Amino acid sequence: MPSEAFQEKTAPLRALGPQKVWSMMISLFGDLAQGKGEVIEGPVLSHILTALDVKPEAARVALHRLRNDGWITSTKAGRISHHGLSAKGRNQTIAATPRIYAQPSNVNDAWQVVFIEDASAEANAAMLASGFSPIQPRLFAGSRDLPAPKDALVMAGTQVPDWLCQSLRPIGLLDDYTALLAALTNLHEALPQGIDLSPLEIAILRCLIVHNWRRLVLKHPALPGALIAPHLPEHQCHISVAELLNRFPRPALRDIAVSAANP
């Protein structure tokens, strides 16, 4: 099991909420076992979830839900259960991966403004689903490589006024981003360069980082780099998440299993 010191260092991340167990499992499998045919053994999964303060009964309920929803498949080899993403779960995880793991330096700077004729809720939802962010009713901003509706007025973005960056921020998530940034900042201080973590601890750490980042960043469209104010918490979170995931690369499943079996 992870050391008490490690549990103390990661406590601020575990305290962020709400933490839905089934959603945390999706983050865990998406990070550690996204490859085709990759599975996490039952005992290893139990070790990780226990360290994440998930009770056994809650873990069983979450696994049952994910199997019923077609996200997870479970098989047995002898007395050991093996859990992995289903084809559906893997496809949806792969679709979200570029957004979750994007490097801040790779964010596209080219942007556009799109003015649409249809003011209906359905048209607004369609623009959001396409990756555009609303400025005002019928007026949207987004990356220049996003396809705009055929009958829309499209203008290439040039100079970016400060008010536009402010108006495009995910207002309803700002408190959550601020709390996540504080937890990540504490984590950077608690885990200095050169610290030695076991494969099991790295797996737990990555799950905490990915899950808390994923549950925020997937709730709003991605913005082109030119429309992101670099000093704001949401962008600073992106930088911090990328740095930590780069510092602690994804461990091999076999190494996590050995680490879990030899505390």
Image (spheres, rainbow, N blue to C red):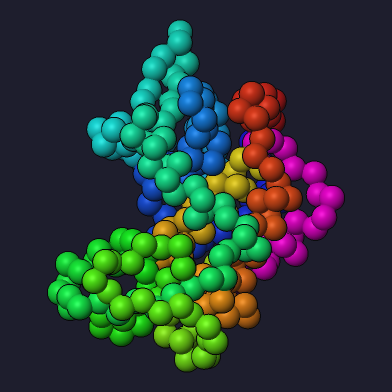
Residue 107 position, x and y percent, is: 58, 64
92 over 35 or under it: above or below = below
- Residue 224 or residue 100, whichever sits in front: 224
Query: Would residue 138 be seen by someone viewing this image from the given angle?
Result: yes
Q: Is residue 15 located in the magenta-colored stretch of the structure?
A: no
Query: Would residue 8 be seen by someone viewing this image from the given angle?
Result: no
81 over 94 or under it: above or below = above
Q: Is residue 186 located in the magenta-colored stretch of the structure?
A: yes
Q: Quadrant of residue 115?
A: bottom left
The residue at the point 70 percent across, 50 percent down is 246
Residue 260 position, x and y percent, is: 63, 29
The residue at the point 65 percent across, 30 percent down is 252
Quarter that holds the N terminus: top right
113 over 73 or under it: above or below = below
- Residue 54 or residue 194, whichever sits in front: 194
The residue at the point 46 percent across, 87 percent down is 164
The residue at the point 36 percent across, 26 percent down is 73
Residue 22 position, x and y percent, is: 37, 44
Residue 22 vs residue 30: left or right? left
Magenta stretch: dominant secondary structure: helix
Q: Which residues are magenta?
A: 181-201
51 over 157 or under it: above or below = above
Q: Quadrant of residue 150?
A: bottom left
